[in-house]
Amino acid sequence: MQAKVLVVVLACWISACNGPVVADSVPDVQKVAEACPADNFEEYLERFENDVEAQRRHTASPLQWDFVDACEVFLRPALKQMLGAAEIEYPVIPDSALQARDGLVREMTASNEEVQVKLSKPDTDYQVTYYFRTGACWTLYRKADDSL
């Protein structure tokens, strides 16, 4: 909320110093709020999972991708790679229909400014955790694939 107020105050100050401002050049508080597809994380996640464009808008670049290399699991159990915008493959998370079809189980854990969404498949080694940070909206900033 403080950031939105600061944007409006700054825009007013700039317009006072530089004369009239074109309406679309000043960030509108409502436009900033509309940039986030939902008010709560459950609704946001539903939209994020099922809308690739929402994924593109709300995925950090670089995206931290942690994974296990099955060939080197004993030498280096966890590898980390930072993916730039051009290297991120979409969709970054399976949509809800694919999750249901593949029998994936979703678990969510929330802390102060982070939500973790873990998808796993019972009786298999499939386990991927998605890490979202909150700000003006939630952003996927890390994906940890612990599957072998």
Image: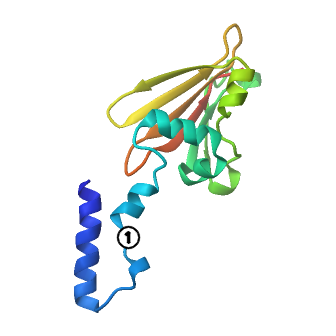
The image quadrant of residue 13 is bottom left
In the drawing, does residue 45 fall left or right of residue 86? Answer: left
Pick the front one: 66 or 141: 141
- For disc 1, the marked residue is 27
Residue 112, image x, y percentages: 32, 33
Residue 88, image x, y percentages: 67, 48
Residue 104, image x, y percentages: 66, 19
The image quadrant of residue 77 is top right
| Residue located at (24% from left, 62% from top) | 5
**In the image as oriented, which residue stretches furthest toward the bottom?**
19
| Residue located at (38% from left, 52% from top) | 136
What colour scheme has been applied to the protein in the rendered image?
rainbow
Tag 1's secondary structure? Answer: loop
Using a 10 Å C-alpha cutoff, classify the residue at mark 1 as few (fewer than 14 neighbours), some (14 to 19) or many (20 or more): few
- Give the quadrant of the C terminus: top right
Query: Please, what is the three-letter code of the amino acid marked with disc 1?
Result: Pro
Residue 108, image x, y percentages: 48, 24
| Residue located at (63% from left, 55% from top) | 85
Asked if residue 17 is positioned above or below residue 48 in the image, the reply reads below
Asked if residue 114 is positioned above or below residue 10 in the image, the reply reads above
The image quadrant of residue 147 is top right
Pick the front one: 34 or 121: 34
How many numbered marks does the figure carry? 1
Asked if residue 59 is positioned above or below residue 102 in the image, the reply reads below
Asked if residue 12 is positioned above or below residue 141 in the image, the reply reads below
